[in-house]
């Protein structure tokens, strides 16, 4: 089994993605999650570039990391300057870590047109910087920036940048596909050439501008690279980096590689979702291995096949990566799936039972209205409970009202809404109001606020996604809309749906279902009886 070191750059390269902004606390939490997964290296920032990264490295000394080494990132010294005189370089050299990564140019075009210096001075910058850090006791990785483009333009010079780094003490040579434009066969061929020419471990750092970052990383490993760099969820500069969640699963399942220092791939989905939550991003539903749809089956033939033998439509078992199989409820799924879903709530119900037939008719009627339960299975579970059980709701709506105006009495001049919600819980009534950024946000806040005294666990619940679709434009602004929301309490995720010609009412229906489902899943008792 081939040992591959995973090098995660979420906290550095990932922080350069549009829309990403980490606090120091965020970075500390993500570092701990990455270590829990079993990665070998966490590139955590550039202490020479900003105060936030300096604070991170100071506070990170308190982390209890079992697998990962923290890596500080920075550039070689500046041109025509001694290492000891370069302020930013010396911040890197004084960072309290054992491993540093420094990048230098490997493409003559970058040297002449961007650095505005000579090829020989660039080589001196690389060599002197590596030696300076090695002399201070650091393990040094040399990131050969734009290496592949440089190799294609001037093979000899690109290789000289690697040689200089190796001769001055570098411990690994990182081939950076910085622009992300090469194809897998090119990366494989060039990496193989480098591996045959150097005795140091070779690493691959691929960007995804041509959609090939994962494939390029796998080809580099096949060619002899023994370290793969990327970000866990693939976000980064421009189109992002190689998605390590996909890379590690591919290497483990398809290429007989060991990547996680003894940790189990069953943690992959939970760690990925935790990092997504901290990063305030949504994992794509169709993300390989970790996405919500990665093991979801909708068509009747697919459902029949995977029920008989999962290998018919699944290339790996979902539990192997900590995910789960989902059989989607829809009009094409059939009664067999309906029975499976019902059986989770009401066991031993026969397919010919009048209740089953009535539920099938209810499903078809709701889908005719615009409901689509394949994306909101939590709402469908509630349909089952309401149809087949003596369902006791956790609360009953008495009244809600949303208020919005422009301009609003807000010092910042922003459009703000307020919502008033009155509910009945058991024999008690309660009313409250809340402000939010738009009517749905205000309604969401008010609903949870009025229910939290009765059900304290709702303090941990919040929305992670909100989607609206106009079902038919024939009636213009009176058209029916479908609202789909995704919610989380930090441990589990669920989706609910609402349909109405009134977008606020549709949102209310989805929000109310979200609260009901959460409380049922948590085993909370309804104030009107046990559900």
Image (cartoon, rainbow, N blue to C red):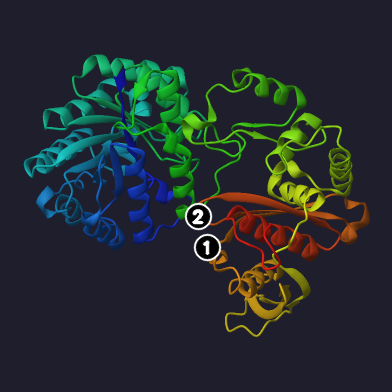
Quarter holding residue 130: top left
Cβ atoms at labels 1 and 2 below 8 Å apart: yes
Using residue 126 as the reference point, say whether residue 248 is left or right of it: right
**465 above or below 459?**
above
x and y percent of residue 145 in the render? 32, 35
Q: Residues within 10 Å of mark 2 (few under 14, many from 20)?
A: few
In the foreground, 14 or 133: 14
Q: Which mark is residue 490?
A: 2
The quarter of the picture where the N terminus appears is: top left
Q: What residue sits 78% from the left and 50% below the top?
A: 383
- Quarter of the rendering occupied by the C terminus: bottom right
Q: Is 448 on the left or on the right of 81, as rendered?
A: right
| Mark number displayed over residue 460 | 1
Q: Which mark is residue 327?
A: none
Q: Is residue 447 left or right of residue 116?
A: right
User: Is any part of residue 236 visible from this angle?
Assistant: no
Q: Nearer the viewer, residue 436 or 334?
A: 334
Residue 327: which quarter of the image? top right
Question: Which residue sits at x=73%, y=58%?
Answer: 510
Q: Residue furthest right?
A: 475
Q: Where does residue 206 sit, x and y in percent of width and height?
A: 40, 32
Q: Secondary structure at mark 2?
A: loop
Badge 1 or badge 2: first in the primary sequence: 1
User: Residue 30 location in percent, x, y?
Assistant: 37, 50
Expressed as whole percent of the image width and height from the top left, the position of residue 241 reads: 44, 38
User: Residue at 74% across / 47% down in the picture?
Assistant: 380
Front position in the image: 313 or 358: 358
The residue sitting at the left extreme is 135
The residues tagged by marks 1 and 2 sit, at their Cα atoms, a distance apart of 7 Å
């Amino acid at each position: 089994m081939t040992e591959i070191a995973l090098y995660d750059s979420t906290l550095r390269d990932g922080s350069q993605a549009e829309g990403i902004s980490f606090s120091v606390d965020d970075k500390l939490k993500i570092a701990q999650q990455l270590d829990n997964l079993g990665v070998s290296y966490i590139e955590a920032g550039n202490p020479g570039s900003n105060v936030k990264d300096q604070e991170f490295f100071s506070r990170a000394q308190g982390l209890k990391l079992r697998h990962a080494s923290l890596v500080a990132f920075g550039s070689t010294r500046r041109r025509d300057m001694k290492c000891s005189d370069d302020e930013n370089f010396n911040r890197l050299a004084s960072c309290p870590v054992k491993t540093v990564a420094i990048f230098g140019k490997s493409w003559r075009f970058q040297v002449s047109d961007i650095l505005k210096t000579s090829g020989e001075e660039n080589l001196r910058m690389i060599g002197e910087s590596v030696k300076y850090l090695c002399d201070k006791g650091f393990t040094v990785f040399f990131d050969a920036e734009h290496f592949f483009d440089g190799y294609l333009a001037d093979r000899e010079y690109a290789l000289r940048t690697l040689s200089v780094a190796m001769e001055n003490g570098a411990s690994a040579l990182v081939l950076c596909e910085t622009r992300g434009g090469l194809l897998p066969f090119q990366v494989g061929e060039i990496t193989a050439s480098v591996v045959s020419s150097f005795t140091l471990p070779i690493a691959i750092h691929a960007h995804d501008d041509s959609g090939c970052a994962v494939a390029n990383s796998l080809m580099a490993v096949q060619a002899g690279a023994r370290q793969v760099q990327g970000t866990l969820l693939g976000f980064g500069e421009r189109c992002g980096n190689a998605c390590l969640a996909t890379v590690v699963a591919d290497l483990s399942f398809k290429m007989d590689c060991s990547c996680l220092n003894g940790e189990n791939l069953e943690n992959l989905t939970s760690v990925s979702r935790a990092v997504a939550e901290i990063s305030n991003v949504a994992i794509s539903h169709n993300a390989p291995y970790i996405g919500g749809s990665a093991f979801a089956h909708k068509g009747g033939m697919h459902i029949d096949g995977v029920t008989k033998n999962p290998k018919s439509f699944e290339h790996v078992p979902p539990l192997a990566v900590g995910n789960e199989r989902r059989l989607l409820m829809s009009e094409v799924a059939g009664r067999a799936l309906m029975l499976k879903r019902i059986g989770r709530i009401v066991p031993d119900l026969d397919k010919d039972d009048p209740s089953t037939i009535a539920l099938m008719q209810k499903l078809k009627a709701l889908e005719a209205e615009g409901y689509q339960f394949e994306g909101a299975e939590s709402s469908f579970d509630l349909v089952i409970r309401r149809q087949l059980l003596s369902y006791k709701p956790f609360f009953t709506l008495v009244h809600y009202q949303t208020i919005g105006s422009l301009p609003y009495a807000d010092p910042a001049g922003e459009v703000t809404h307020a919502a008033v919600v009155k509910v009945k819980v058991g024999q008690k009534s309660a009313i409250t109001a809340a402000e939010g950024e738009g009517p749905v946000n205000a309604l969401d806040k008010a609903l949870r606020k009025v229910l939290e005294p009765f059900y304290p666990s709702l303090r941990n619940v919040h929305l992670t996604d909100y989607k609206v679709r106009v079902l038919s434009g024939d009636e213009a602004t009176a058209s029916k809309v479908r609202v789909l929301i995704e919610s989380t309490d930090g441990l589990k995720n669920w989706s609910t749906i609402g349909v109405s010609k009134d977008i606020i009412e549709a949102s209310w229906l989805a929000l109310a279902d979200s609260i009901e489902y959460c409380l049922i899943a948590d085993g909370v008792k309804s104030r009107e009886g046990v559900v």
